[in-house]
Amino acid sequence: MVRATFALLVILLAGCDDASRKESSTLDVDDPDFRQGQIFYKQREIRRALECYLKVIDNRKGAAEAHLEAGRMYSDLEDPLPAIYHYNQYVRLKPTSVQNGHVKQMIRTAEKQFMQQLPGRPMEPDALGSVDINARLRTLQIENEKLKREVADLSRNQKTPDTKAAVGTGVPVATPDKSAPESRNGRTLPYTIVRGDTLSVISNKMFKDKNHIKAIFEANRDKMTSQDNLPKIGTVIQIPQ
């Protein structure tokens, strides 16, 4: 279950350092990047719009409206965890906003969406209260922090090939791992299929573009007969690095 949340949680756990952002006498909605984000959104270029709003957040202290728009972009991309984070930042920065009731409803909707994306759907969202869901999210965030450290250790260990003793010498020699899919540098990362995934979606999640669809397919031919025939939810595939 924890692996299924790996790709979804990385962005959420990056905290905001308000002290590092510049003070500004202008509103974040007047920022050129904010306005450009609105243009991209009208053109339905969601990811480019999101990049603009995140740039405003990085450059400005208290960019509440940019947080709200970033949350909406993540919701449109069906990425509920970072959406929840940005919605909560808006409520924190504007506790008296007349929009807070609507934003809190969007938070609840994103929480239910996240619970539905978990492999095997261990919990039905309608059976849980908001407090229980938030507690579950916090638990998953803690587990994910531990997972990220384990993945980093695993990546470092994969740089060292398996060895076996050379006949008659007792000296270890490198032997290739025949079971792992080939990639440019010989390394792969596991990825668990979740609801709504396609090779295009997975490529966007892992590489921020759609240029790796063929490479992912080639690395998982034992599980896929075509690029459109994705394995069932919960199946672990390998992402070439």
Image (cartoon, rainbow, N blue to C red):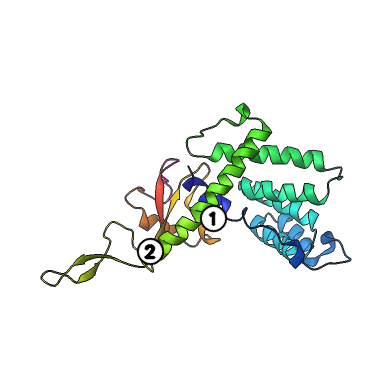
Q: Picture coordinates of residue 73 (x, y %)?
A: 68, 51
Q: Which residues are magenta?
A: 226-234
Q: Amino acid at mark 1?
A: Lys
Residue 125, magenta (yes or no): no
Q: Label 1 neighbourhood size at 10 Å, few (<14), some (14-19), many (20+)?
A: some
Q: Picture coordinates of residue 92 (x, y %)?
A: 78, 49
**Compared with residue 211, is residue 119 higher up or lower down, i.e. above or below?**
above
Name the side, left or right, on which 13 lies relative to 57.
left
Q: Amino acid at mark 2?
A: Asn
The residue where tag 2 is placed is: 157
Foreground of the two, 228 or 126: 126
**Compared with residue 217, is residue 173 higher up or lower down, i.e. above or below?**
below
The rendered magenta stretch, by its main secondary structure, is classed as loop
Number of labelled discs?
Answer: 2
Foreground of the two, 72 or 42: 72
Of callouts 2 and 1, the N-terminal one: 2
Mark in the foreground, 2 or 1: 2
Residue 205 numbered mark, or none: 1
Marks 2/1 in contact by CB < 8 Å: the verdict is no
* Residue name at image x 34 percent, y 63 percent: 182
Q: Label 2 neighbourhood size at 10 Å, few (<14), some (14-19), many (20+)?
A: few
* Residue name at image x 68 percent, y 49 percent: 85
Residue 146 numbered mark, or none: none
Q: Residue furthest right?
A: 25
Q: Is residue 240 visible?
A: no
